[in-house]
Image (cartoon, rainbow, N blue to C red):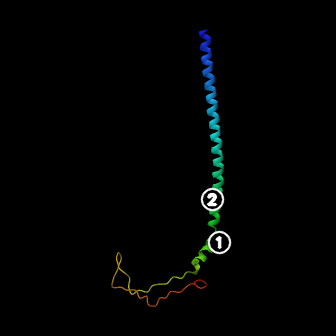
């Protein structure tokens, strides 16, 4: 009688452990499925964002945006030299030297403006 009781207890414990392990494996399997679906969604989103970044950084689009915002291409920029009587000393400025700016005028770019 004692042996049968001991065998029943061990068998019941083994069945309980087996059922619990099966439940844990099923739960892990569902979690892996969810994570797989999330990785797939994030991969798709990453691909979309990469395409969007490529479209946004396309040279033609940047030129069109710059033109719409009154910016000019480097070939259209002219450097204006500033006349000066002497150079300022290295490491400081000479307050006695004044730059004559009376002959400089600002011009609006052609084809833009109000």
N-terminal-most mark, 1 or 2: 2
The circle on residue 36 is none
The circle on residue 60 is 1
Q: In the image, what residue occupies the spot 55% across and 85% down?
A: 108
Residues at marks 1 and 2, CA–CA distance in whole angstroms: 19 Å
Q: Nearer the viewer, residue 45 or 60?
A: 45
The image shows residue 16, relative to residue 67, as above or below, that is above
The residue pinned by badge 2 equals: 49
Q: Residue 42, position in %: x, y?
A: 63, 52
The image shows residue 63, relative to residue 106, as above or below, that is above
Label 2 residue SS? helix
Q: Nearer the viewer, residue 99 or 64?
A: 64
Q: Nearer the viewer, residue 2 or 57?
A: 2
The image shows residue 48, relative to residue 34, as above or below, that is below
Quadrant of the rendered image containing residue 53: bottom right
Q: Residue 35, position in %: x, y?
A: 63, 44
Q: Nearer the viewer, residue 86 or 103?
A: 103
């Amino acid at each position: 009688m004692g042996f049968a009781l001991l065998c029943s207890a061990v068998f019941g414990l083994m069945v309980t452990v087996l059922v619990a392990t099966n439940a844990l494996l099923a739960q892990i399997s569902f979690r892996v499925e969810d994570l797989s679906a999330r990785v797939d969604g994030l991969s798709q989103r990453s691909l979309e964002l990469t395409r969007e970044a490529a479209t946004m950084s396309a040279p033609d689009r940047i030129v069109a945006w710059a033109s719409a915002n009154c910016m000019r291409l480097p070939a259209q920029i002219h450097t204006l030299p500033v006349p000066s009587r002497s150079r300022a000393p290295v490491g400081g400025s000479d307050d006695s030297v004044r730059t004559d700016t009376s002959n400089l005028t600002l011009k609006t770019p052609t084809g833009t403006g109000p």
